[in-house]
Image (tube, rainbow, N blue to C red):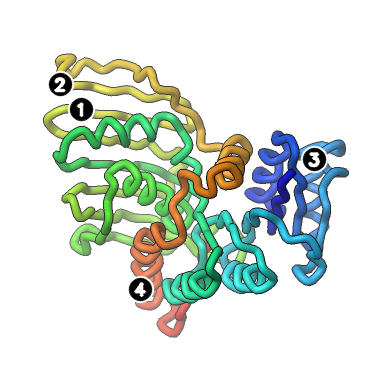
Amino acid sequence: MFRVLVVGAGNIGARHIQSLCQLNDIKIDVLEPVKKSLHNLKSIIGLKNYTKIGFYEKISEIKTLPDVAIVATPAKPRKKIILKLLGIGIERFLLEKLVCQSTKQYDSILKAFSEFDNAQGWVNFPRRYLPIYTFLKENFNKDSEPIKMLVDTGDLGIACGAIHQIDIFQYITNAKRLSIDESCVKLESIPSKREGYIDFSGNISILSNNEDRLLLNFTDDEFWPLLEVYRNSKSYYVIDNDHEFSHCALKDDGWVWKKTLTPTLPPLVSQITKEIVFDIMDKNKCKMPTLLESYNSHQLILDLLLKHYNENVDNNANILPVT
């Protein structure tokens, strides 16, 4: 039997717990001081599962260390929580994103992990566990022609949603380094769905070291991500996870649009977390990027948005109020 600690039982944390409840031979502990969140959790996982869970309100109450800690709190307190959990001896982490609110905070977290010989951290990007993206990764890595990826989405916000798309772009292209094309940046501050936070709409263009290009178009309309990945001379794929469809047009088939055979599924935390944790326990690794591997994508988005925030909202801020 192995033990998992979930820190934060809000919307995302509850879905992590829901997924973990599907595993056998597991002990689940939850660190959550807010009673309303616990009431919501009970309605999601049911009383039978709820009564099997150990609950804590403070880190100091934890007596038995977990094999894995999932940190699903808002971004604001996450750095402090991670450092405290490292300090009591927890070694393996799955972290929600954005991991923190500035590159400086991210640097501090990486430094803290480096001070513990066995500490490992992964950042949770569920799309990496979906068959369609594994298929695209294998398909597009057959030659070196640059890949182009376009993401159109609304009602998400760049702070909440862009990091997912940047990560899957990095995953598919095997990019070692990403940079922002400053000539294609257009940003506008918008209200966040969560009180006390801010978000952004607009356009961002990102280039890889292999000349691949990602174009992000985030509007304030209400529609979920539509993703297009293509090579001009060979293939074109269109993916809509939310409505579970994927189509492709291939040069070898005369550019006729067809439905792909590879399953296209929504990236549901409630279904995928159990696979991630099982891989960590079984192999001591998983498909998620490590903290270090996710640094470049976080740095891009955090530095870009903080610069815009300083220039247009608060020129004294050294952290970005996003989650």
For label 2, the crowd category at 10 Å Cα-Cα, with few meaning under 14, some 14 to 19 and many 20 or more, is few
**Residue where numbered disc 3 is placed:** 43
**Residue where numbered disc 2 is placed:** 251
**Label 1 secondary element:** strand
For label 1, the crowd category at 10 Å Cα-Cα, with few meaning under 14, some 14 to 19 and many 20 or more, is some
Q: Tell me the CA gap for discs 4 and 2.
A: 42 Å
Question: In this view, which residue lies farthest toward the left?
Answer: 233
Q: Tell me the CA gap for discs 1 and 4.
A: 37 Å
CB of mark 2 within 8 Å of CB of mark 1? yes
Kind of residue at disc 2? Lys
Between 250 and 134, the residue placed more toward the observer is 134
Question: What residue do we see at 55% from left, 64% from top?
Answer: 119
**Label 4 secondary element:** helix
Kind of residue at disc 4? Lys
Kind of residue at disc 3? Ser
Nearer mark to the viewer, of 4 and 2: 2
Nearer mark to the viewer, of 4 and 3: 3
Q: Which of the labelled discs sits on residue 235, or is there none?
A: 1
For label 3, the crowd category at 10 Å Cα-Cα, with few meaning under 14, some 14 to 19 and many 20 or more, is few
CB of mark 4 within 8 Å of CB of mark 3? no
**Residue 241 locus on image (x, y percent):** 45, 32
